[in-house]
Structure formats: structure tokens, C-alpha cells
Amino acid sequence: RNVSIAGARLRQGANMVQIPLMGSSYNLEDLHPDLSGRNSINDMVRRASTIAEEQGPSGEKPSGAFLPAACLSVALGVFSVVPYNMVLQGDPGSPLFISFVLHLVVITMMLPRVPSIIRNRKFPLRYHAGMVFFSSMFTVLKSDAFVRLPPSMCLLLSNLQMMVGVAVQYVLFRKTYSFQQLAGVAIVTVGIAWAGNSIQRAKAQQEAGVLTATAALTGAAEMLGSSLCISLLSTLIKMANSTYGESVEEQMFMQHLLTIPVVFPSNWSKVGPRAAAWWSAQNHWLFLNLAGNVVASFAARKASAAMTARSPSLLMTQLVQTMESFLQLLLTAMLRVPPWPPLGFWGGAGVLVAGTLQYLRASDSSSGKTS
């Protein structure tokens, strides 16, 4: 009956129609067409109901679309890896120092808006405490892993976030996914492992130095731990924004401000002496790349926070982060040609694309069962 009423009003050329459905109403502006060809009224209402589920408290809609934020987050995150790798080539032990500088810049850039952020604070302090804890653990584990392992291996291991995200959703919320969705996740993981392993073997034949078994196992455990922390952080951010409304600047400022006294005083031996050594060496190339990485990372984190807040699900957030990490791995390999990445890399890239398309198709067909 509702569909018939909507169809009649559409034929009358109405610019706006309210369709009552299961106690809620949906605007015609929410009934976007679908490129797959499923553009019946029923299909458009289903997609409109998905949009309604993503609204904040009191029917408040997200302040922007998910897809533009996701594309911007990926683009900036991939670009930031260029100066980051340049800094690591000049000083392999500097990841924690880079993170410290980034935290200071984020806080400094947001200082003019602090009164407004505090006055209009939305999230309870317990949410901020959780974000600071997971962010701190992520920073420490990832920074130490980058010191122990080659950057390419760290980027490879960081691509396991989709598998970690599925496990987190099941353990915390008993959330289940369809077989087709899990197949997409598995295919993505296989593609990443294939491509990353091919690059790592090729690099091992070129680079001097021996990676001990202890360093490899410790670094791998730290990267997996950092993936778990970023998954839990994304979950908490999504819960906060869904419950209290989107507040990207508040989340970024409080997270970076409170992480500094938690992480860096106990690790000052990896930060303070390095800053003094850089200043004494007057290595302008290092400072230039550091500045480029910090600016790009600041913009990328802001876009990533918006993407996470607007994402329809944790697994979709993990998919975006996985694509970003894979593109970072590709760019890292391309920066050091020749030689070009081996054939196994391109085969793994093809499998990754196939797995991504499989997951997206499965999510569209089962959107009535999973978020």
C-alpha cells in the first residue's frame, strides 16, 4: 500500500514525498538510484532505510557522505607514505619521534577551536579514555614494529585488518556475516598475502642485513596487536558517533592531547635524543620529509576520523583501511624501481580486487541481514 501511494505521488511529479514505513518516514531525496539496475520502489526504500539507520541521535544525519570521506582518507594516507619512507631511510629508528611531532602538530593546529570543542563536547569521558588507551597501544606497537621489521613487511601485516575486524565484531557483538561476505574477506586476505610475500622475497634478495627470528616474531606480534587496537578504536569511534552524533574535531583533539602524557614520557629515550641529533646534524632533507609527512598525516587522520564516523559498519571501515594499506605497499614498491614488482605481486593485486568486489556485492545483497 505504501509503495502504491509513493508511486502515485511520483507520477504526480511531487518533489518531496514522505513514505511511512514501519513507524518511520523516508524522504524522496534519500531514495537514490542504484547503478546495479535495482531501482524499484522497494529497492530504493531498502537503501533509504539503510541511510536512516546511520542517523545520529534525534534523527540527526551525518554531516557528509561516506564515499567522499573514504576516498580522501585513502588518497591522503597513501600520499603520506612517501615522505614517511624517506625519513625511515635516513633514520630507521625514528617512527616514535615522527608520531610525537604529529601529535604536537595536531594539537597546535586545533588550539584556536579548543573553547568551542570543550563547550560543545558530545562524548562522555569514558569514551575518550577508551580512545586514548587504544590509540596509545596502537602508536607504541606500530612504532616499535617498524623499527624491528622492514617497512614493506609492516605494511603487509597491517593489511590483515579485515580479518581482525570480523573477529572483533563476532567476539564483542556476536555479529555474523554471510558466507559470501566472509568469502570476500578471505579472498582479500589471500590476495594481500600473495602480493606482499612476493614483494618481501624480492626485497630480501636485494637488501643487506639479516632479520632474526626473534625480531620477526616480535614485530609480527606487534603489528597484529596494533591491528587489533585500531579495530577496537574504530569500533569505539563508531559507537560514540552513532550514539551522540558526529564530532570529529573533539575526537581528534582529545585523543592526541591525552595520548602524549600516556605514551611519550616512558619512551622519551626514543624521542628527545633523536630530536637533538637531528638538530645537531642539520639534515634539512630529513626535516623537509618530516614536515611533508606530518602535514599529510594530519589531513589523512582528519579524513579517516570522518570516514569512520560515517561508515555503515566496522567491516566497511576495515575494507577502506585495507585498500589504503595495500596501495601504500604498492607505492612503496614503485618508489624503489627498478626492479619492478614481481608477477606474484600483480597476481595478488588481481585477487585483492576480486575479493573486494565479492564483499561489496555480498554486502549489497544481504544488507537486510547485516549493517
Image (tube, helix red, strand yellow):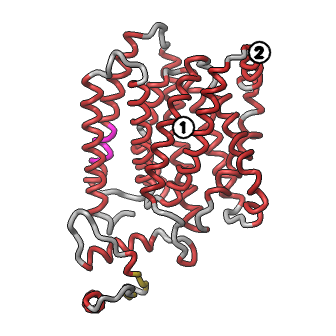
Earlier-in-chain disc, 1 versus 2: 1
Q: Name the residue under label 1.
A: 226
- What predominant SS class does the magenta segment belong to? helix
Residue drawn 38% across the image and 20% down it: 200
Q: Name the residue under label 2.
A: 280
- Please state the horizontal and vertical placement of residue 362, each as a whole percent of the image: 27, 57
Would you say residue 77 is visible in this rendering?
Answer: yes
Q: Is residue 111 above or below residue 364?
A: above
Report whether 47 appears left or right of 57: left
Split into 4 quadrants, where in the image is the N terminus? Answer: bottom left
Quote the CA–CA distance across marks 1 and 2: 33 Å
**Which mark is drawn over residue 45?**
none
The outermost residue toward the top is: 208
Q: Name the residue type under label 1.
A: Ser
Magenta-colored span: 183-189
In magenta segment, residue 99? no
Q: What element carries label 1?
A: helix
Query: Across the whole image, how many numbered discs are drawn on residues?
Result: 2
Residue 174 shows up from this direction: no
Which is nearer the eye, 97 or 318? 97
Q: Position of residue 66 (x, y in %)?
A: 45, 59
Q: Is residue 334 found left or right of 131 in the rendered image?
A: left
